[in-house]
Image: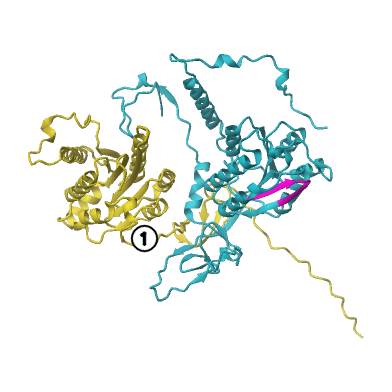
Amino acid sequence: MDEEPERAKRWEGGYERTWEVLKEDESGSLKATVEEILYQSKRKRVIESHGQVRLGMMRHVYVVIDCSRSMEDQDLKPNRLTSTLKLMEVFVDEYFDQNPISQVGIITTKNKRAEKLTDLAGNPKKHITALKKAVDTVCVGEPSLYNSLNLAIQTLKHMPGHTSREILIILSSLTTCDPANIYELIKTLKSLKVRVSVIGLSAEVRVCTVLTRETGGSYHVILDESHFKELLMLHIKPPPASSSSECSLIRMGFPQHTIASVTDQDAKPSFSMSHLDSSSGPGLSLGGYLCPQCHATYTELPVECKVCGLTLVSAPHLARSFHHLFPLQAFVESPVENLQGDRFCQACQAELKDKSVSG
Amino acid sequence: MASEDEINLLVIVVDVNPIWWGQQAQRDPQFTLSKCMDAVMVMGNAHMAMARTNKLAVIASHCQGSHFLYPSKSWSGEDGGGNDVSSSGDGKYELLSAANNLIVEEIRNIMSKIEVTGNSTDTLLAGSLAKALCYIHRLTKELEVGQEIKSRILVVKAAEDCALQYMNFMNVIFAAQKQNILIDACVLDSDSGLLQQACDITGGLYMKIPQKVALAQYLLWVFLPDSEQRSQLVLPPPAHVDYRAACFCHRNLIEIGYVCSVCLSIFCNFSPICTTCETAFKIQLPQIVKPKKKKLKQPM
């Protein structure tokens, strides 16, 4: 049906002598070689990163977590579900740290159905509380790729064109139960410019390969828990924007932070709009961030004003995203013998002892 | 009480912009650079005297670069250095007098040898903060097992802000926030928006001194206690930080602006092309509604 790239499967290749790479040092330990290999792979990843490519800075990501019966398997300690949820908490924290103006939503799928755990939101606390509560869910049934993708599309298709729409699926089962043709859905995803990536916990599944290839995402299968964490962290960097995403000027507000104390005569307590739907008591506060358009109070940024719809951010949030746009150039290693004069580090006043110096 | 193994590191970054200090000496001969360095040395000595495991570093921030005043590379260690340098004869703790002598000698070298060339008269504060972070990082890596280190940076700022250093400054601030390093600021002359943001984001203290002559007093009262002790003291209230962004076209602070989705530059007015990344924007045209054809009434 569609042309597959010529790629030999692992069992079709000849024998690889992977043990020859490791060498022992004089005390018989392999630690130095292992660290060297890890270091080289990290540097390769940094150098490979694209130069002047337009990045999708405002991202809407839906994470689909498989809660089917295969998640009770104990190959990740204590079981796959607990391990996944713990890594998801780390993911959510890092994600909002690196992309402060983006949003995340979580969907779970089990028993041939899909349901939303949390809506698309820019506040990490809601997601983390939901993830902590989800540890008790019973894993039963089969997942449904079609239903979860459908549920995600229903929200993503209303998002404005300049944002990047992504879905990240964590799939542990080898089967999926779909009510309709999933290849039609893949065509819809392509037309809506949604990028789907999959992290497999068991083995490679062909329908996922097709799904990620058609939509432009990535497909990886984990080796162990640290590899799982590494693969999740790969999705935190903003992906290159697709050529058809529109660039537009987005209207944003930069609210002032008012701090008032009880002794001020003009200070009036007000409800924070962000706590309207939470049930934790009246959220009266004296200060906060005032929306410049409608003067509604909010306790935290970034947030979308519920009254007038203006996105509110503060300047450091935008500055946070700058280091993706202006990345550091890779350091060039030069051997320490080439240095003339004192072997001295300008920045921290230490003697240079390593074999090679980067700069 | 702090445990025996905890090391408290204080890095003092002093702004020694020669142009500002030269003008200051003419404005007010009572408060000159030497008086300021005296106050800084008093603060450094006080910090080192608080506990045996406290450490100090001093960096001078110049418009041509930044230099470590203490510890400097010509000083090989506590036992080296020679007896002629450190013997002060009045029974002062040897470490403190050695540190003072070093600082005085280095600042004298720097101010006499470096000439101001070029057009830039702004202090390279972001670079000095980056060097301070490197030094802290190196000391953290050299710790033995079981030792903890808590670090903070104190900036004594004299001249005005330089808007060109905004990106570097923000990077330094985020790096310090990640490493849990506090940045405190003691401002002598004009308020600095960048340092206010730095202190707010990292959790440090910002203070503009009302009377420059009393610099030593303010340093000892406000900035000497470390973060654990600060919760038990009543210190000056936090300054009102202006987090509004400045637009790229006029450098005015704006409350509502337009942000380019590609390069995140901020504009105050709508314009069809972004000046930074030169992308043409899609303009939302209002929908044209076709008027409904009304049936004309036939004249009777």
In the image, is A136 to the left or to the right of B32?
A: right
Q: In the drawing, does residue A222 fall left or right of residue B104?
A: right
- Residue A182's spot in the image, x, y percent? 80, 42
Depth order, front residue of B294/B79 = B79
Is residue B142 depicted above or below A61 in this figure? above
**Main SS class of the magenta portion in the image:** strand
Which class describes the residues within 10 Å of circle 1: few (<14), some (14-19), or many (20+)? some
Amino acid type of the residue tagged 1 in the rendering: Pro
Q: Is residue A226 magenta?
A: no
Per the image, is A111 magenta? yes
Letter of the chain shown cyan in the rendering: A
Where does label 1 land, which residue?
A: B238
| Residue A189 visible in the picture | yes
Q: Quadrant of the C terminus of chain B?
A: bottom right
Residue A54 visible within the image: no
The picture's colour for chain B is yellow
Which residue is depicted at the point 46% across and 67% down? A287
Number of numbered discs overlaid on the protein picture = 1
Residue positioned 48% across, 61% down in the render: B254
The residue segment tinted magenta is A104-115
